[in-house]
Image (spheres, rainbow, N blue to C red):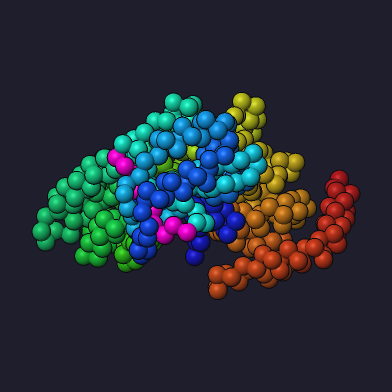
Amino acid sequence: MHREYLSSGLLGLVMKSAWVVGWSMAVPVVAQGESGSWKAALKSTVAEANRLIVAPSGSLVEARKITPHLVFELGGNEKVEDFIDVVQVNDALGLECKCYGRWAFHFYRNKELLATIGYAHFDRLKWKNSKWKGDALLTEESRVEIPLWFKKNDFPNLYEAREAEFEKNRMGKAENELFEGLLREARDGDPVSLAVAVCKALSVSRSTMNSPQYKERRALAKLNQVSSDEFLLAMKQLRNSPEYLVGAAGIFFQRSRARPKHLDGVRDNMPPDMRLEWTLRLSEAVLTHGHDDDKPWILRHLARYDEPAVVRMLHLIAAGEIGRERDRPREALREPSNQVGALLALALLNDETIHLEVEQRLKKADHKQDVAALELCLALLGDPSFIKNEHFSFGSYSIGLAGLTAIERFNGEYGMDVLVESGFSHPWMYVKDQAVVTFDKLTGTEFADVSRDAYDWQQARAWWDSHGEEFKQRHRAESTDAASEKP
């Protein structure tokens, strides 16, 4: 079972800094107190503040380390007072939502922290570690003025985030209307028509293949009325509409967590040639029309096929002739670009022909995930000097898993310290678990029990502390002996 979630260290920051609106509606706490006294208490508490720092919620240490471009500081007591004047709240405190807010305002007197105020949903403030039991609800005017105030003071991030959130809500409403309209195209009593309608609706969804939300789950449940053969007929009807084949991909690749399991037969029962044909067709559909976060997974999936047709397709992706690059700013992407991801897939398939292209791209690469992926291409093609600790610091499945494969290819001769030090500390738990599996393969230990989904990286690390030097000396000796035996 893939455990695709964050390990404890980064999870704390993400839970504090990236709560979405849908998660915030937890059991409310009854509000206490008047907001007028809240504002007065805040003004009194920060009266001597001469520094105002804005950062994603969580500790400033974590925020500065992980998202330094989102940390902003203003100096001077006058600036602090000016900001407090902009803060206007309603007469009574509101019910307390259980998120921490995506942003926090930290008020300092020199190095002394006076107060931390969470800023949630662009409409409320939360006084952390205080007596106040409810949220201070911003007035309509203040909801607009706070982001604008920071924009005027050279920090447009809050304003841009608020505008993006509003645009997201507008797009969500339009998407829902389109989604429901496509579902209604199904004809009563016609399972093939129903499957076509569901695929088309899922294709316009903003949810990823493996993270369906309520409306996607409701649509997927309708496929319980559709057999594997009928679903394949629906795919064939959509053959010439790749923008709508995206919705079929989650079923075909068995990626959607809410899919009816009997439809796994669509792929499992296909002859190999037909399965390969549909793998290529659906992969191209997702890379061109699909969700940005599904594209790295598609490239990793293609790396499992040592087939000429797949290799040709990956070369076309690397050249930018197939697929559409992701839309988000590059600094917001945890995974390498699609073109570099295709090169990484080719390196995993031991395609030596990409060596020169990888070296040339590495000289020009400026996105750190692209740099890491290109370095790992060279490691996978035989250069162990490119196995580095920092490759496991990204929240990237593609880079982390490729790093494990690179280490495994050297059969324990290179990269073991990196595996233990950094592979066991990867932000994604699935990669961390697979690091233990790799460790067992190379050392002959049994710290991973895949049948129970149990991976004891702590015991593996303890074993390495005790036996690592002996292991490395033995492998160096074996390597020297093997080299001396070569003619």
Q: Residue at the bottom extreme?
A: 452
Q: What's the magenta bit mostly, secondary-structure-wise?
A: loop
Which span is picked out in magenta? 131-140
Image quadrant of residue 292? Answer: top left
In this picture, residue 446 sits left or right of residue 59: right
Q: Residue at the left extreme?
A: 188
Q: Position of residue 211 (x, y in %)?
A: 38, 55
Residue 206 within the magenta-colored segment of the rendering? no
Please tell me which residue is depicted at 40% across the width and 35% down the height of the picture: 86
Please tell me which residue is depicted at 35% across the width and 38% down the height of the picture: 142
Q: In this orientation, which residue lies closer to the viewer: 85 or 302?
A: 85
Q: In this orientation, which residue lies closer to the viewer: 134 or 351?
A: 134
Q: Position of residue 223 (x, y in %)?
A: 24, 61
Q: Position of residue 60 (x, y in %)?
A: 59, 45
Residue 138 within the magenta-colored segment of the rendering? yes
In this picture, residue 230 sits left or right of residue 256: left
Image quadrant of residue 373? Answer: top right
Q: Is residue 409 visible?
A: no
Please tell me which residue is depicted at 85% across the width and 59% down the height of the picture: 469
Residue 202 against residue 336 in the figure, above or below: below
Residue 461 against residue 349 in the figure, above or below: below
Image quadrant of residue 464? Answer: bottom right
Q: In this orientation, which residue lies closer to the viewer: 95 or 155?
A: 95
Please tell me which residue is depicted at 62% across the width and 32% down the height of the picture: 358
Q: Position of residue 289 (x, y in %)?
A: 34, 39
